[in-house]
Image (spheres, helix red, strand yellow):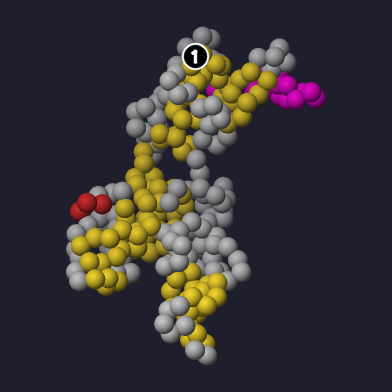
Amino acid sequence: MLNGYTFSYSRALGGRQRWLCSGKNTWNCRMYVYVNDEMELLRVAPRHHTHGPPTYVMTQKGDNDAHENKVIILKGNLEHFAGSTFFHFSFAAKIIRLTNGKTLLMVDGYTFSFSNRNKNYERWLCSGKIANRCRAYINVSQDKELINLSPYAHTHGPPKYLKTRGGEYIKIRSLKVIRLANGKILLMVDGYTFSFSNYCKDSQRWYCSGKNANRCRVFICVNDRMQMVKIASRAHTHQPPKYVKINNGDYVKV
């Protein structure tokens, strides 16, 4: 382990050992290090990791109950550490439920949809399979322990989801500030527009622009950096309005 990143032994080269980043297959990471027989660092590859450092948790042998569904243990990578203590390579993972009722598995920020199962495992495919032509997948056992990752790296960044007040999640595709031709400022989220309402303790509340005309009760809360921190756990009662951008950068409703 170096700076939180882990490396697997590759081969010996003239009194040196070459170790490759453990994310070589999953993340197409080409980082490597050279060490001598005393495990002293000799050289680090002149490049950067393509991913963040993995998470390790220390547990007693066979004691995985404390992790529940928050941590998924990767089988087959159990290493003896000291006495009866072991390390398990782990991923931050959880089951999330969307506002439309669909269930997804979220692993390190990426979401996966259930595909099929056999007697040994369930296969979950990346939610970006169609939109991003992403071939990444994971196989999990019936008790939701991670068995293995696909050899394919994601072709896209992790999607953005926001947890609603009801505990469900909604995917946020875009949030931008727009100005109308009359000077009014609106927030646009997935095509729907929101008008400023009031300040809360640590955020601003914006209500759907269809609050009066369509009796729509959807609202969002954003921080001072215009980052969404909360969204109402209800659906819009109408379709998103249509706006066009004119030459001076303002928007006009059509």
| Vertical relation: 149 (above or below) 195 | below
Residue at image mark 1: 198
Read off the magenta span: 239-254
Spot occupied by residue 191 in the image (x, y as percentages of width and height)? 59, 27
* Residue at the image point whose x is 52% and y is 90% from the top: 14
Q: In the rendered image, which quarter contains the N terminus?
A: bottom left
| Vertical relation: 12 (above or below) 121 | below
* Residue at the image point whose x is 22% and y is 66% from the top: 85
* Residue at the image point whose x is 43% and y is 74% from the top: 8
* Residue at the image point whose x is 56% and y is 51% from the top: 156
Magenta residue check for 100: no
Q: Is residue 254 visible?
A: no
Q: Main secondary structure of the magenta part?
A: loop
| Vertical relation: 94 (above or below) 34 | above
Q: In the rendered image, which quarter contains the C terminus?
A: top right
Residue furthest bottom as drawn = 14
**Circle 1: element type:** strand
Spot occupied by residue 217 in the image (x, y as percentages of width and height)? 45, 16
Magenta residue check for 244: yes
Spot occupied by residue 58 in the image (x, y as percentages of width and height)? 28, 60
